[in-house]
Image (cartoon, grey):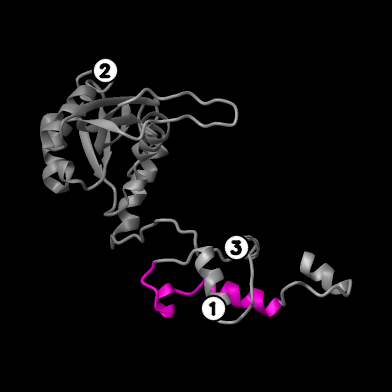
Amino acid sequence: MALRSSLEAGVRPAFPPSLVVQVKALACELPYTLGLPLSRLSVEEIRQHVVSQGLVAEISGATLWRWLSSDALRPWKHRSWIFPRDPNFAAKAGPILDLYQRVWEGAPLGADDYVICADEKTSIQARRRKQPTLPLAPNRPTYVEHEYFRMGAWTYLAAWDVHRAVVFGRCEPKTGKAAFGRLVDDVMSQEPYRSATRVFWVTDNGSSHRGTAAVNRLRGWYPNAILVHTPIHASWLNQIEIYFSILQRKALMPN
């Protein structure tokens, strides 16, 4: 908008529009096309390249950043995602989404049916800082000591009752079938689950609760328990991951 206004006013811009286009095209290039063993280009590297190629005698990094940050394409940003790889994704995801809406096999759940989402959060580092954390102050963030004592790693297993908004959790030295079984015991040994008609357990395909064997094992422990697996590589359908995200942000970081 500023460039257009300047042109309409007859003011020659400091840099021609063609240079802006070239800079944006360069930012979208993979660095290996320039012979650089990098995964991405920094603003400073882009600046050095346009100068070394004679596109401009001198230009500031702030100017380049202003051009790039105002563009719709921002190649320096990335977000991890995974494409569904399970050929039966819809067939497996549908029943889970139905359970969240209190429906199973086309029929509404009864008052004594429950839905539990469960999983493990592994490799949680227990650390003790060598110096106390200093509280924030005006114009200064919280200071967290860089050095720490290693106190081992823990696995946190949690189960989330979707419709009652209740969380059950326990810490274990490591994950496994036995550890998952103890989490199940924590939940199923108490009311209302112990005497419920059905308790649906939504889990991913981790080794602690994978396949038909896990379905039969859970039913053998508790006849009213029904294990429902998310599609492969789709643990994000499991609502316990929302809880783990909150836990990570509000309890574990930055410690």
Q: Can residue 18 be seen in this view?
A: yes
Q: How many labels does the image show?
A: 3
Query: Mark 2: which secondary structure?
Result: loop
Query: Mark 3: which secondary structure?
Result: helix
Per the model, the C-alpha gap separating discs 3 and 1 is 14 Å
- Residue occupying image coordinates x 32% and y 55%: 91
Q: Mark 3 points at which residue?
A: 61
The type of residue carrying mark 1 is Ser
Residue at the extreme front of the image, as rendered: 57
The type of residue carrying mark 3 is Gly
Range covered by the magenta-colored residues: 17-38
- Residue occupying image coordinates x 27% and y 30%: 127
The stretch drawn in magenta includes residue 197: no
Which comes sooner in the sequence, label 3 or label 2? 3
The type of residue carrying mark 2 is Glu
Query: Mark 1: which secondary structure?
Result: helix
Residue 38 placement (x, y as % from top left):
38, 68
- Residue occupying image coordinates x 77% and y 69%: 3
Q: Mark 1 points at which residue?
A: 52
Per the model, the C-alpha gap separating discs 1 and 2 is 72 Å
Q: Which mark is residue 191?
A: 2
Q: In which quarter of the image is residue 183?
A: top left
Residue 121 placement (x, y as % from top left):
27, 37
Quarter of the C terminus within the rendering: top left
Residue at the extreme bottom of the image, as rendered: 54
